[in-house]
Amino acid sequence: MIKQAIIPLAGLGTRLLPLTSVFAKELLPINGKPGLEYIINECIDAGIKQIIFIISKRKMMIKKYFYKDKFYKDLIKKKKDPRIIQEYQKILKYRKMIKFVYQNKPKGTGDAVLKTKKYIKDKYFLMLLPDDLIIKKNCSKSMIQSHKKFKSSVMASMSVNKNTVARWGIYKLNKKLNITDYSIKGVIEKPKIKEAPSNKAVIGRYILPKKIFSKLKNLKPGKGGEIHITDAIQLLINDNEKFIAHNFTGKYLDCGTMDGYINSSKEIAKL
Ligand code: G1P
């Protein structure tokens, strides 16, 4: 059973400036709801019981969002508005599941994952990157099914235009296992077109083994000077750890860029 999820939230969101100069990108509304709530709901619906948020001092706004008790209680007393009561109850429900850890220097996704080491209890855990929304079908849920079937680590995968491979982690595929799953031989972070082993990209959903912490501990910064989870995954694959690329069937929305962010509200409004 996968019961814990982690969400790296310490990123600065420079691609969404100026919206992110004073605001956490993960709280920006997408069709009237903070993007982060879509991610939390995906977790809950997939059976996750605890979510670890990796924030930073600069992103305290995220913690405050879940701890504004006095504000809500005063309002509810005065107004008795059922909508506000419902929203507050939702926040209380989320809060019970969330634990906060800190990554005060933006050293990359691998470093963010390492901050959760003490709190991960089971052999496997889920990670969701909050810039990547997947709608119409719960990607985490179907990845958990593949994980149960193949007893291995799983990452979300999508075909991308060859010209854009340098934006993604790219898979080196091994064998097709069924309609949606491939075993993989490797994964390379943001390769040049010439170096890309395929056009299948890593999308921000990962079922990772606890073992990954031993690789992350000694990992040196890679592309762009950041510590990449992709590089730790490659080290595990080199040790014969089984990883699967799961071609999800939902629709991917890239909320980390301005165009993508604007488009995501439009797509969700159509649902
Ligand atoms: C991260 C990962 C990359 C993956 C991408 C998916 O990159 O490092 O391997 O393909 O998320 O969104 P980032 O978006 O942080 O540049």
Image: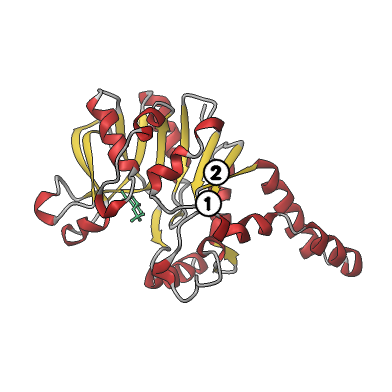
* 20 horizontally vs 193: left or right: right
Q: Quadrant of residue 78?
A: bottom right
Task: Please state the horizontal and vertical placement of residue 141, each as a whole percent of the image.
Answer: 48, 39
Q: Residue beneath label 1, please?
A: 39
- Callout 1: 10 Å neighbours few (<14), some, many (20+)? many
Quarter of the image for residue 183 reads top left
Q: Amino acid at mark 1?
A: Ile
In the image, residue 83 above or below residue 183? below
The disc label shown at residue 163, or none: none
Q: Amino acid at mark 2?
A: Cys
Does any portion of residue 269 appear in the rendered image? yes
Is the CB of the residue bearing disc 2 within 8 angstroms of ligand 1? no
Question: Residue 214: horizontal and vertical position, in percent?
Answer: 38, 28
Q: Residue at x 46, y 76 (%)?
A: 18
> Mark 2: few, some, or many residues within 10 Å (few <14, many ≥20)?
many
Q: Mark 2: which secondary structure?
A: helix
Colour treatment of the image? secondary structure
Q: Say whether residue 182 is visible.
A: no
CB within 8 Å, label 2 to label 1: yes
Q: Nearer the viewer, residue 259 or 227?
A: 227
Please name whichever residue, 168 or 100, is drawn nearer the observer in this view of the structure. 100
x, y percent for residue 268: 49, 65
Q: Quadrant of residue 252?
A: bottom left
Q: CA distance from mark 2 to mark 1?
A: 6 Å
Q: Is residue 108 above or below residue 172?
A: below
Q: Which residue is mark 2?
A: 43
Left/right of residue 100 with respect to residue 258 in the rendered view? right
The residue most toward the right is 77
Q: Secondary structure at mark 1?
A: helix
Front position in the image: 116 or 27: 116
**Count of residue discs:** 2
Q: Is residue 94 above or below residue 36?
A: above
